[in-house]
């Protein structure tokens, strides 16, 4: 899988990035470095002002351009407050015109995958922050996406919840092996999760480093306290501060 | 002995959720909200009754509450017929206001140009005093009922239009992005996202419009009533005024007040029932 583009000077400049199929890639950088903009371009929500985005995919849109099935997780859970967890998860299928019984089955299955079996009829306001985020992830997974785009999804959660969601996300990813592009401003989170960390810098937003995280999966709490993890975090952290200083 | 028994019972039935103490079927803290206004109301009525009796005020200047009440019972037949007519106009106007207001708001949300070009005229309609244009409408429209309905509608429809327009445009931006991501059609976005987002504001508008529809109907009846062509509650008030039957005037006024309160409460109930699962205004905090 390959894509390359560069946009106007303001948000992103000369970004050239290859994303491998089945990869877990983190975009790491300070706020204002355009990592969310890059993610929104990947999602097709905004157009790059120059350059191209090339997704080899079996699926095509109305104009015949290859367009993979995408899942998107926002920084906030972004659930419809008037709908139950099940209806929220079933939304993408409903928009695709999937029949009711099928979409309810698939939504219930997706909820079970994120550990929320039994919460089908709960309204978002009755769920905790972590559970809402799980519903949001289930909604992104319900269409069996080829690419999962996540925009600082766990930034607003407490640390304990964030660790658990990190582990659950890794488990789901290892089960299905879709591609993940994960935006974060946390060095520790990016190292823990990803196979590759792309460090970005601001003004103008650009890619300054690409670091491979050569630790094997599955990664668990033992990895989080290992010397290997600490060393990797130090390397990435150093890369980030160098990148910002440049 | 009895203490030990009470303790063991407490242990036995650990409540899953906090027990709400109920008095006569209502939560205990709901009673002040009902009782306090009742106390004030009763005290004022008694004071009024006393003042009128002690000062021997004649009923054609200020009738005592007891006289108003007996007049209401005596003239119930005439008054209830008029009440029914006023109610029909009010609810027809409210229904049309809700339907047209919603439809126009949806059009506005679909096309910014339409909103830019038409919204100012909706404002013009709203700020024009209804008493000033009611005579015209009554002259232009042959059917008096229809003329009254149009007047009540003009007064009632603006809150629904402006609230719903605001509501349709205030759908969460991330959710809108999500709909775009899954390539939702405009209709899907309207039905699954914008209309549910607008529901709280639409219902708030409906609640304001309920009272306004009644006021519009009454004002229009007053204007039409001077021509002696209608028979709603406002006409009864005019008629009673000409005949110096002041207690009857008050009785009709009382009915209008009660109608307004009932409309307000019923629409509040509708609001609560529709929003109770999810909207902050309708759900009770648990902690």
Image: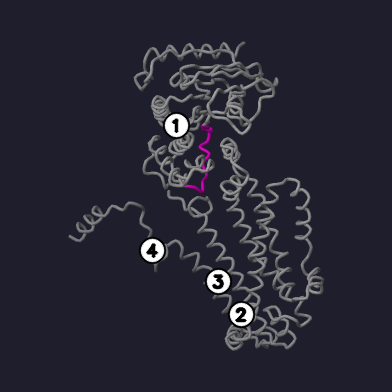
**Is B271 or B37 nearer to us in this picture?**
B271
**Is A162 or B59 nearer to us in this picture?**
A162
Residue A70 coordinates in the image, percent (x, y) = 53, 31
Contact flag, marks 4 and 3 (Cβ < 8 Å): no
Q: Which residues are magenta?
A: A71-83
- In the rendered image, the quadrant that contains the C terminus of chain A is top right
Which residue has dot 2 on it?
Answer: B48
Chain identity of mark 3:
B
Residue shown at the point (52%, 28%) measured from the top left: A149
Seen in the picture, residue B79 relative to B153 is either above or below; the reply is below
Callout in the foreground (2, 1)? 1
Q: CA distance from mark 2 to mark 1?
A: 62 Å
Residue shown at the point (61%, 57%) measured from the top left: B204
Coloring scheme used: one colour
The answer to whether marks 4 and 1 sit on the same chain is no
Which residue has dot 1 on it?
Answer: A158
Chain identity of mark 4:
B
Which residue has dot 3 on it?
Answer: B40
Lower position in the chain sequence, tag 2 or tag 3: 3
Which residue has dot 4 on it?
Answer: B22
Callout in the foreground (4, 3)? 4
The answer to whether marks 4 and 3 sit on the same chain is yes
**Is B106 or B210 nearer to us in this picture?**
B106
Q: Is residue A135 magenta?
A: no
């Amino acid at each position: 899988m390959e894509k390359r583009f560069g946009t106007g000077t303001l948000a992103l400049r000369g970004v050239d990035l290859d994303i491998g199929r089945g990869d877990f890639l983190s975009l790491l950088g300070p706020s204002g470095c355009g990592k969310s903009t890059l993610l929104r371009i990947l999602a097709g929500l905004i157009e790059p002002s120059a350059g191209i985005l090339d997704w080899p995919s079996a699926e095509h849109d109305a104009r015949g351009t290859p367009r993979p099935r995408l899942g998107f997780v926002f920084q906030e859970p972004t659930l419809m407050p008037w709908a139950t967890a099940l209806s929220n998860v079933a939304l993408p299928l409903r928009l695709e015109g999937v029949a009711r019984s099928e979409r309810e089955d698939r939504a219930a299955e997706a909820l079970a995958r994120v550990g929320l079996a039994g919460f089908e009829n709960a309204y978002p306001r009755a769920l905790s922050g972590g559970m809402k985020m799980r519903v949001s992830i289930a909604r992104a997974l319900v269409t069996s996406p080829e690419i999962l785009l996540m925009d600082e999804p766990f930034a607003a959660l407490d640390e304990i919840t964030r660790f658990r969601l990190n582990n659950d996300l890794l488990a789901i990813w290892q089960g299905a092996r879709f591609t993940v592009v994960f935006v974060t401003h946390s060095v520790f989170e990016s190292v823990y999760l990803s196979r590759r960390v792309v460090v970005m810098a601001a003004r103008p937003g650009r890619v300054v480093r690409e670091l491979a995280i050569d630790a094997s999966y599955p990664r668990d709490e033992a990895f989080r306290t290992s010397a290997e993890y600490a060393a990797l975090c130090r390397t990435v952290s150093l890369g980030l501060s160098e990148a910002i200083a440049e | 002995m009895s203490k030990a028994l009470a303790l063991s019972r407490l242990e036995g039935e650990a409540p899953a959720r906090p027990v709400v103490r109920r008095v006569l079927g209502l939560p205990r803290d709901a009673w002040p909200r009902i009782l306090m206004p009742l106390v004030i109301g009763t005290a004022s009525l008694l004071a009024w009754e006393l003042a009128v009796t002690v000062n021997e005020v004649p009923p054609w200047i200020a009738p005592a509450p007891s006289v108003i009440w007996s007049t209401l019972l005596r003239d119930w037949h005439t008054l209830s017929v008029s009440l029914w007519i006023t109610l029909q106009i009010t609810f027809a106007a409210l229904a049309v206001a809700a339907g047209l207001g919603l439809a126009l708001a949806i059009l506005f949300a679909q096309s910014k140009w339409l909103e830019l070009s038409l919204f100012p005229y909706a404002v013009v309609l709203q700020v024009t005093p209804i008493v000033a244009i009611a005579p015209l409408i009554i002259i232009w429209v042959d059917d008096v009922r229809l003329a009254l309905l149009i007047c009540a509608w003009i007064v009632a429809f603006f809150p629904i239009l402006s609230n719903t327009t605001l509501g349709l445009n205030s759908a969460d931006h991330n959710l809108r992005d999500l709909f775009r991501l899954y390539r939702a059609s405009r209709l899907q976005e309207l039905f699954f996202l914008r209309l549910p987002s607008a529901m709280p504001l639409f219902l708030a508008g409906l609640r304001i419009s309920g009272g306004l529809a009644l006021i519009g109907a009454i004002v229009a009846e007053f204007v039409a009533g001077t021509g002696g062509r209608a028979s709603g509650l406002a006409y009864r008030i005019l008629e009673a005024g000409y005949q110096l039957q002041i207690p009857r005037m008050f009785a009709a006024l009382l009915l209008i007040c009660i109608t307004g309160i009932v409309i307000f409460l019923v629409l509040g109930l509708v609001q609560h029932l529709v929003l109770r699962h999810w909207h902050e205004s309708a759900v009770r905090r648990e902690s």
